[in-house]
Amino acid sequence: MRHGDKINNLSRTASHRKAMLKNMACSLIQHKSINTTTAKAKALRKFVEPLITKSKNDTQHNRRVVFSYLQDKQATKELFTNVADKVGDRPGGYTRILKIGIRSGDNADMAMIELIDFNEFYTPRTKKSDSKKKRSRRGGTGKGTEKKAETAPVVEDAVEVVEATPEAVVEAIADTPEAEVVETVAETEVPVVEESSEETPEAQSTDESSDEEKKA
């Protein structure tokens, strides 16, 4: 029983298992996809993905470390040239496992393991500018910012017109006859009517009639 055993021994000794994973990794790097059992594919993914991460930084030390695992010059060269260029922008998850059915001989669960970036049909490479959408801070699509950008130049043009021709506007107003009329009206003095304390004859007659009614 393999209670708590995190490593799948694959029914092999340590030396046999390491040699098998080394050969499978070289085949995967050279051919970009291979068919094997699901258990071997999962073990190979843990073995080869750290080596692909090493290949992103092309130094002599990293090449020697990868070669100590693969023991193949051609596979090491392919990994640091073509594979590293393809997976340079990917932060991880370089391989994909796809189940392809059951093997007819021993009824084993079969799978295909491949490098993701080399399958152009399954995962087409798209530009980052096309895939990402502009969003505002509230989570919208950014339509409000586009409207502001469109209206901003109109406001600036209006301000420029007003600032550029203030004297011309004043001269045009001064030439009109309405302005002259306004000036003459402003110069004329409006007579102030003072309230007189004297009562009019009509008011006196109304007062006399009211006194006579009281006496009667």
Image: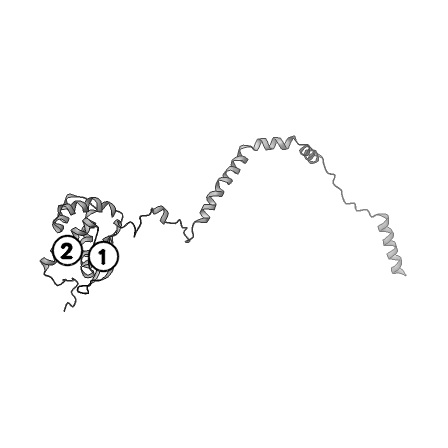
The N terminus, quarter of image: bottom left
Foreground pick, 87 / 192? 87
The C terminus, quarter of image: bottom right
Q: Nearer the viewer, mark 1 or mark 2?
A: 1
Image x and y of residue 86, in percent: 25, 46
Image height of 59 relative to 36, above or below:
above
CB under 8 Å between callouts 1 and 2?
Answer: no
Instruction: Write the residue at 45% across / 46% down.
Output: 146
Q: Earlier in the sequence, mark 1 or mark 2?
A: 2
Q: What residue does disc 1 label?
A: 112
Q: Is residue 161 left or right of residue 55?
A: right
The extreme front residue here reads: 104
Q: Amino acid at mark 2?
A: Leu
Image x and y of residue 148, in percent: 47, 45
Foreground pick, 36 / 174? 36
Image height of 205 relative to 156, above or below:
below
Foreground pick, 29 / 64? 29
Q: What separation in Å lies between label 1 and label 2 (alpha carbons)?
A: 15 Å
Q: What residue does disc 2 label?
A: 21
Q: Is residue 183 left or right of residue 21?
A: right
Residue 62 visible in the current orientation: no
Crowdedness of circle 2 by 10 Å Cα count: few (<14), some, many (20+)? many
Secondary structure beneath dot 1 equals strand
Query: Within the image, what quadrant is residue 43 found in?
Result: bottom left
